[in-house]
Every structure is written in structure tokens, then in C-alpha cells.
Amino acid sequence: MSKIKLATVWLGGCSGCHMSFLDLDEWLIDLAAHVDVVYSPIADIKEYPENVDVVLVEGAIANEEHLELIHTIRKRTKTIISFGDCAVTGNVTAMRNPTGNADVSLQLAYIHGADINQQIPYEPGIVPPLLDRVVPVHRIVPVDIYLPGCPPSAPRIRATIEPLLKGEMPEMVGRRMIKFG
């Protein structure tokens, strides 16, 4: 059997879901026998490849780079997993939504919240242009599997990935698999 092409992506979130993924510890060695990691912030691969079988998408869509990347991911991936509460609901990342549009958020962060050098960075490449509202992944592209948790535990991540290695869909039912927070 050929290896599954696995990707992980970190959008608007804290990287806690990736930390939980690393908490799979020794099972990562077993996993490596069944997957090729083709894209991940852990591997620092620069371009999202074609023909990805499964991707774990951590974080919400918060800026234009996220928006562009998630469309690329959907076009090039068979199974998208919304990985963690930020990807599933927007969670903490979306806490800026009630403040208003992106300009208000930038003012609050870089002008009102700064003690020194009060200026909004405008140089291209420093801060990707923010979207006016942070949204969960499924608001932009269809999602195949939702894996909530802040972050999801390593056993829950394994219980989601393991069936996919056998060509089966995981059963995302019950408190053990679908608890938020």
C-alpha cells in the first residue's frame, strides 16, 4: 500500500494543535511508516503541493494569506480536517470580530495598545492584510472532518487519523471525539 500524503497547516491560531500533534510521541514513528509529510510548519516546506490526501488545518481564516492558502488547500487536497476550535468555530482568533473591521483591530493593537513606536506596519510582508472578520475554515471552503478541542488531545488526534490510514472515515461522535475546549 502506498503512503498517504499528509499535510498540516497553521493559520490564525496559537500552534497548540500542532503541539498536541507532537504529543503523539512514539506513535509518530508508527505514523511515519504510513504517511509522507508533504507540507507542515514543522517541516518548513514553502509551497503547498498537489495531490495531498489528508490535511490538518489549524486556525481560523484571519488574513488574505490564509484566504489564498485555504483555497489552494481545497483544490489540492482530498480530505480537509478542521483541526481544533479555531478552525472549527473561529474561537479565540475571532475575538477581534466584535471590535469592528480590520482597521479598528489594527488601531487597537498598534496605536492604543502600544507604549512606544505607535504605528501600524504598512510595509508589504510585515503583516499580511487582515480580513475584516475572522471566520472558521468551513465558511470559506467545504470541510470533510471536524476535530474540535482547544487543543484536541493526542489520543483524539490519533483516533481521527488512524482510520484514515486504513481508508476508513473516523467516527466523530460522543464526548471523547467532539468535545470543544
Image: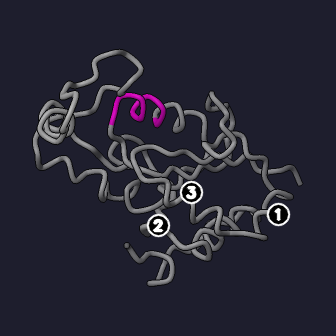
How many residues crowd around disc 3 within 10 Å: few (fewer than 14), some, or many (20 or more)?
many
Image position, residue 133 (x, y; %)? 22, 40
Whole-angstrom CA distance, mark 2 to mark 3, is 9 Å
| Residue 151 marker | 2
Label 2 or label 3, whichever comes before in sequence order? 3
Q: Is residue 98 above or below residue 158?
A: above
User: Where does label 3 land, which residue?
Assistant: 18
What's the amino acid at mark 1? Ile
Q: Give the residue displayed 51% in from the left and 73% down from the top.
A: 172
* Residue topped by disc 1: 29
Q: Tell me if label 3 and label 1 are in contact, CB under 8 Å.
A: no
Counting residues from the start of the chain, the first of labels 2 and 1 encountered is: 1
**In-front residue for pair 36/23:** 23
Residue at far front of view = 116
At numbered mark 1, what does the secondary structure look like: helix, strand or loop? Answer: helix
Mark closest to the chain's N terminus, 3 or 1:
3
Identified at 18% across, 38% down, the residue is: 115
Would residue 65 be counted in the magenta stretch? yes
Residue at 86% of width from left, 58% of height from top?
Answer: 33
Say what amino acid the circle numbered 3 marks.
His
Question: How far across and down, in percent of the image, does residue 150 sit?
Answer: 42, 67
Instruction: Look at the numbered disc 2 and give the secondary structure of its residue.
Output: loop
Residue 181 is one of the magenta-drawn residues: no
23 left or right, relative to 181: right
Q: Nearer the viewer, residue 4 or 125?
A: 125
Q: At 64% across and 50% down in the image, what residue appears?
A: 54
Q: Secondary structure at mark 3?
A: helix
Q: Which residues are magenta?
A: 63-70
Tell me residue 40's x, y (percent): 63, 43
Left or right: where does residue 148 sit relative to residue 129?
right
